[in-house]
Image (cartoon, rainbow, N blue to C red):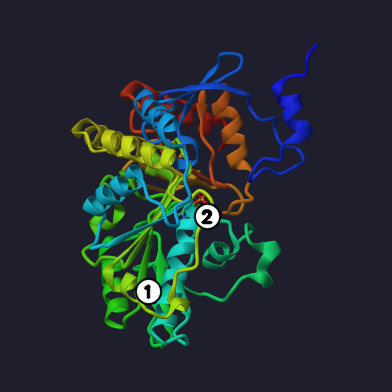
C-alpha cells in the first residue's frame, strides 16, 4: 500500500512550533472552503483561529484566487530595485488612504517579522543618518511578541521562545504595557524608538490594554522625539473591530508594520509604512544614508494583487457588519461563561476585543509550556473545530465570514470540552 501523506511527511518535513517527540501527527489537508479546513478523509474542521490569524475572508476565496490567477498570467515577479508595477503602486496608494496616521511611504517585504525588522532598522538608521547614532536604545513592552528572526526575537519578551538564543539577542528596555504597571520615566535622550502591539498583545498571551493609557504614553514618547513603531501585524485589517487598532488611539505612530491579514491570508507579504519625517532622513547626497534592505520577493506582484483583492472584500459594508456581529456574539458568550457555575473557579481573565475573545484555564502554572492547551486542541478537533491555545490561554479568532451557526458550534464545542478538562 502506498505510504500515507502523514507517513511521507514524517520522513521529510519539520513543522514550526512543533516538539519533535510525542506530538500528534499533522492532519493531512485536502482543501479549504470558507471557514472549513477539510482533511483527506473529507472531515471538516472550523478554523476558529484563522490559520494562525491570517485567513480573514475564509479559505480558498474565489474572488482573491481569480485576482491572483489573472496577475500570475501577466507578471508573476520582478526585481523591485529599479523597477515598479501597478499592483505595488496601487496597493501603496490604497493603504496610505486607510492607515491610522499620516504615512507617506510604503516599504514592502514578505512577512510579519521582516515588516518589523524593517521598521526598527528604519528607526535606528533615522538617528544614524541625522548624526545622532548614540540615540540607539529601544523600548518594548513586557509580554510583547514581534517575530522569530534575531532582531524581532530581541524585541520580544524573553521567554521559552528565545531561551536558546538569550546571549545573542540585542539589549532592549522592557516596560509594562501602558496602564498595567511601571511606566518608563527616562532618561529619554538615548531612546531611538518605542515598539508596541496596540491594544492587544497576541502571541505573548492575548493581553488587552487600554487605548487611553497607550495614547498618554505615545504622547510622552513624541514629546521626547522617540519614534513610535506600531506592530499591527496581527491587529490590522479589522481584527480589533476597527480597521486598525491604531484607530482607537488619537496619538499616531511614525512607523506601522503589517502582514498576516494583509492578503486575506493567501500570500506572504509584509508592509512597513513611515511618515515623511522618517523618510526625509534618507533623502541625501551621501549614499551611505541609503536604506540598504530588501528581499528577493519584495512587493511580489501576486501578493500585492491578493492584498488589493482582500481590501476590496474588507472594505465592503457587509464585512464590517460581520465583524461587528462576531464582536457582539463574543461578548454574549463571555457573559454566558462568567455566569456558568461549572467554570467559575476554573477559568479566569475573560476578555474580548473585536473578533477575538480569550481566557485562561486555571491549571498549574500559566504560560506557553502548560500542556492543557494541547488537550483542548485534540478534543475540539474530534468535534470538528480547530483551536490552538497559547499554553493555558484559550482564544477564538475566526475568519470574518463565519456564520452565526458556525460560531455557535465553536462555542458549544468549547464549553463541552472545558467540562472535560477543568
Ligand atoms: C505574527 C506576528 C509577527 C510575526 O509575523 P510572521 O509573519 O509570523 O513573521 C510579528 N508581530 C506580531 C504582533 C505578530 O502577531
Pick the residue in front: 353 or 7: 7
Give the answer, above or below, for where 174 lies relative to 316. Answer: below
Give the image quarter of residue 69: top left
Outermost residue toward the top in this view: 1
Residue 29 in picture, x, y percent from top left: 58, 24
Residue at numbered disc 1: 282
Residue 397 in picture, x, y percent from top left: 41, 39
Give the residue drawn at x 44%, y 25%: 60
Residue 167 in picture, x, y percent from top left: 68, 72
Q: Is residue 205 visible?
A: no
Does residue 240 appear left or right of residue 395 in this picture? Answer: left
**Viewport quadrant of the C terminus:** top right
Whether the residue carrying mark 2 lies under 8 Å from ligand 1 is answered with: no
Give the residue drawn at x 46%, y 63%: 118
Whether the residue carrying mark 1 lies under 8 Å from ligand 1 is answered with: no
Pick the residue in front: 190 or 199: 190
Give the answer, above or below, for where 136 lies relative to 68. Answer: below
Give the image quarter of residue 246: bottom left
Residue at numbered disc 2: 295
Please tell me whether mark 1 sits on a helix, a strand or a loop.
loop
Q: Earlier in the sequence, mark 1 or mark 2?
A: 1
For marks 1 and 2, give the CA distance.
19 Å
Does residue 171 appear left or right of residue 254 in this picture? Answer: right
Pick the residue in front: 223 or 111: 111
Neighbours of disc 1 within 10 Å: few (<14), some (14-19), many (20+): some
Neighbours of disc 2 within 10 Å: few (<14), some (14-19), many (20+): few
Residue 2 in picture, x, y percent from top left: 78, 14
Give the residue drawn at x 64%, y 50%: 369
Amino acid at each position: 500500500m502506498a505510504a500515507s501523506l502523514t507517513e511521507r511527511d514524517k520522513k521529510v518535513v519539520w513543522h514550526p512550533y512543533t516538539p519533535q517527540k510525542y506530538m500528534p501527527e499533522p492532519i493531512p489537508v485536502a482543501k479549504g472552503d470558507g471557514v472549513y479546513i477539510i482533511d483527506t478523509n473529507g472531515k471538516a474542521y472550523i478554523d476558529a483561529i484563522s490559520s494562525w490569524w491570517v485567513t480573514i475572508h475564509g479559505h480558498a476565496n474565489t474572488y482573491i484566487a481569480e485576482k491572483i490567477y489573472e496577475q500570475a498570467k501577466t507578471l508573476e515577479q520582478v526585481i523591485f530595485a529599479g523597477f515598479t508595477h501597478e499592483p505595488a503602486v496601487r496597493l501603496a496608494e490604497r493603504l496610505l488612504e486607510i492607515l491610522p496616521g499620516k504615512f507617506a511611504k510604503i516599504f514592502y517585504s514578505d512577512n510579519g517579522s521582516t515588516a518589523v525588522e524593517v521598521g526598527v532598522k528604519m528607526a535606528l538608521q533615522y538617528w544614524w543618518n541625522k548624526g545622532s547614532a548614540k540615540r540607539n536604545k529601544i523600548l518594548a513592552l513586557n509580554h510583547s511578541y514581534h517575530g522569530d528572526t534575531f532582531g524581532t526575537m530581541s524585541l520580544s519578551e524573553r521567554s521559552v521562545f528565545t531561551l536558546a538564543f538569550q546571549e545573542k539577542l540585542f539589549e532592549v528596555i522592557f516596560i509594562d504595557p501602558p496602564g498595567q504597571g511601571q511606566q518608563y520615566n527616562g532618561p529619554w535622550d538615548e531612546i531611538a524608538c518605542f515598539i508596541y502591539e496596540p491594544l492587544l498583545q497576541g502571541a505573548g498571551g492575548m493581553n488587552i490594554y487600554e487605548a487611553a493609557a497607550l495614547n498618554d504614553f505615545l504622547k510622552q514618547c513624541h514629546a521626547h522625539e522617540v519614534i513610535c513603531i506600531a506592530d499591527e501585524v496581527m491587529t490590522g485589517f479589522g481584527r480589533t473591530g476597527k480597521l486598525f487598532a491604531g484607530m482607537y488611539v488619537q496619538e499616531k505612530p511614525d512607523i506601522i508594520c503589517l502582514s498576516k491579514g494583509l492578503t486575506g491570508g493567501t500570500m506572504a507579504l509584509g508592509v512597513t509604512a513611515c511618515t515623511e519625517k522618517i523618510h526625509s532622513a534618507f533623502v541625501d547626497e551621501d549614499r551611505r544614508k541609503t536604506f540598504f534592505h530588501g528581499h528577493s520577493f519584495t512587493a511580489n506582484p501576486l501578493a500585492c494583487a491578493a492584498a488589493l483583492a482582500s481590501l476590496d472584500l474588507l472594505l465592503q459594508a457587509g464585512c464590517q457588519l460581520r465583524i461587528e456581529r462576531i464582536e457582539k456574539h463574543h461578548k454574549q458568550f463571555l457573559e454566558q461563561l462568567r455566569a456558568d457555575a461549572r467554570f467559575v473557579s476554573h477559568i479566569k481573565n475573560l476578555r474580548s476585543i473585536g473578533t477575538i475573545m480569550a481566557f485562561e484555564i486555571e491549571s498549574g502554572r500559566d504560560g506557553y509550556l502548560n500542556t492543557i492547551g494541547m488537550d483542548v486542541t485534540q478534543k475540539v478537533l474530534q468535534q470538528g473545530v480547530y483551536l490552538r491555545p497559547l499554553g493555558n490561554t484559550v482564544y477564538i479568532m475566526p475568519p470574518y465570514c463565519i456564520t452565526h451557526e458556525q460560531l455557535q458550534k465553536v462555542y458549544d464545542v468549547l464549553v463541552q470540552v472545558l467540562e472535560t478538562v477543568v
